Image (cartoon, grey):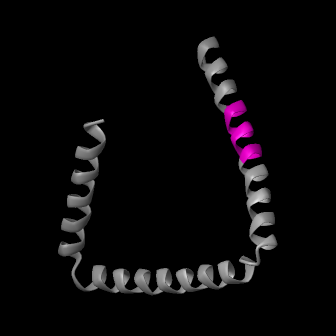
Amino acid sequence: MTLIDSHVADDVSEAGKRASAFADKIGGKARKIVDEIGLGHRADQVAADVSKRAARAYDVAKETVKEKPTLAIGVAATAGLLLGLMLSRR
């Protein structure tokens, strides 16, 4: 590792630490606001519902891939191509 690589790695590490601390600070404030206005219980219900729906969607996708692997490969390739095209046009 060169000196420049070491400095870049240190900078990235420091940026990660700062971002994590900022996210913790903001998350704590957001949770406090949600609790103060009484949305905590509702947010928990919504999160549980979303989790259940995501699990069902995962199960359906898993079964579809098992039943139609060629279709799954085509969908994945198309999604990758579209994502690549969108990112390359930045």
Q: Nearer the viewer, residue 26 or 37?
A: 37
Q: Is residue 83 magenta?
A: no
Residue at horizontal 20 percent and vertical 59 percent from the top = 78
Residue 82 drawn at (x, y percent): 23, 53
Q: Is residue 19 left or right of residue 36?
A: left
Q: Place residue 63 in its image quadrant.
A: bottom left
Residue at horizontal 67 percent and vertical 25 percent from the top = 11
Q: Nearer the viewer, residue 36 or 78?
A: 36
Residue 50 visible in the snapshot: yes
Residue 2 visible in the snapshot: no
Q: Is residue 69 left or right of residue 56?
A: left
> Main SS type for the magenta part?
helix
Against 45, is 69 above or below?
above
Residue at horizontal 56 percent and vertical 86 percent from the top = 49
Name the quarter where the C terminus is drawn.
top left
Q: Is residue 67 left or right of residue 3?
A: left
Q: Place residue 5 in its image quadrant.
A: top right
Residue 12 drawn at (x, y percent): 64, 30
Q: Place residue 48 in its image quadrant.
A: bottom right
Q: Nearer the viewer, residue 55 or 30?
A: 30
Which residues, given as a range, are shown in magenta? Answer: 13-22
Residue 33 drawn at (x, y percent): 77, 65
